[in-house]
Image (cartoon, helix red, strand yellow):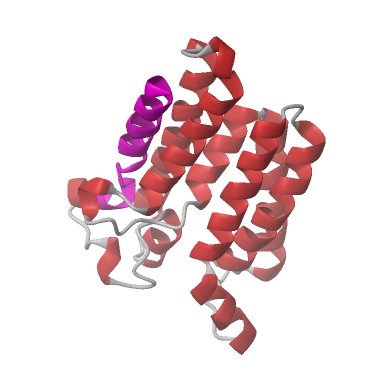
Amino acid sequence: MLTLVLIAILAYLMGSLSFAVIVSRMMGLPDPRTFGSGNPGATNMLRGGSRAAAALVLLGDALKGWLAVWMTLHLDPLPALHQQATAVAALGVFMGHGYPLFFAFKGGKGVATALGILLALQPVLGLATLMVWLLVMGVTRISSLSALCAALTAPVLGWLLLDQDWLRWTVLALAVILLAHHRANMGRLIRGEETIFRKAR
């Protein structure tokens, strides 16, 4: 039990590294929490006009999710509680991203971090979920709708592709939290007020 708690704490601290804020400070850009949606994530960085910064944030947020789970899967700190340790790491890093200790608990919605987690759990699951996001984004040009569709699809894909119940329920939990993070976006989608990203000319 003590080891599970330690894994949760370490994963949470890893997730608390908000790459949107870190990259903005390193590149001398405005704090992403002060413009656009106020969300410290790759999409809002793109709204700020820096594709390079958005790409770095996307990579960093996905990498921390992937690394937290990959380390638990491959270092195997608790052979007898392997599934539980992996689930704890996944939820810990995801919650750290959403409520980061280092940035006044104001974090991102977790789309990129969730993708990294899914890729570590099962690469096909991660890639299939990414394809859903890309397909919806390509058709609608609405990032939040793409994230919502991916979040709804991931648990179904997880139930088919994962063979361990703990991990299936973990993917479902991640999806529910992700949907909760997008409550305001759902309202704007219903009202037809959500941001549409225009194709570059």
Q: Nearer the viewer, residue 70 or 52?
A: 70
- Is residue 137 rendered to the left or right of residue 9? right
Percent position of residue 41, x then y: 40, 56
Name the residue: 60% across, 33% down.
119
- Is residue 84 rendered to the left or right of residue 65? right
Return the residue found at the far front: 1
Percent position of residue 60, x then y: 39, 39
Return the residue found at the far bottom: 191
Percent position of residue 7, x then y: 39, 26
Q: Nearer the viewer, residue 28 or 188?
A: 188
Q: Is residue 59 visible?
A: no
Percent position of residue 8, x then y: 40, 33
Return the residue found at the far right: 160
Q: Over which residues does the magenta segment extend?
A: 1-23
User: In this picture, is 168 found above or below 79?
Assistant: below
Whether the magenta-drawn stretch holds residue 35 is answered as: no
Name the residue: 65% across, 32% down.
166
Location of the N terminus by quadrant is: top left
- Is residue 130 rendered to the left or right of residue 88? right
User: In this picture, is 186 found above or below 78?
Assistant: below
Q: Is residue 169 visible?
A: yes
Name the residue: 72% across, 27% down.
164
Name the residue: 36% across, 64% down.
49
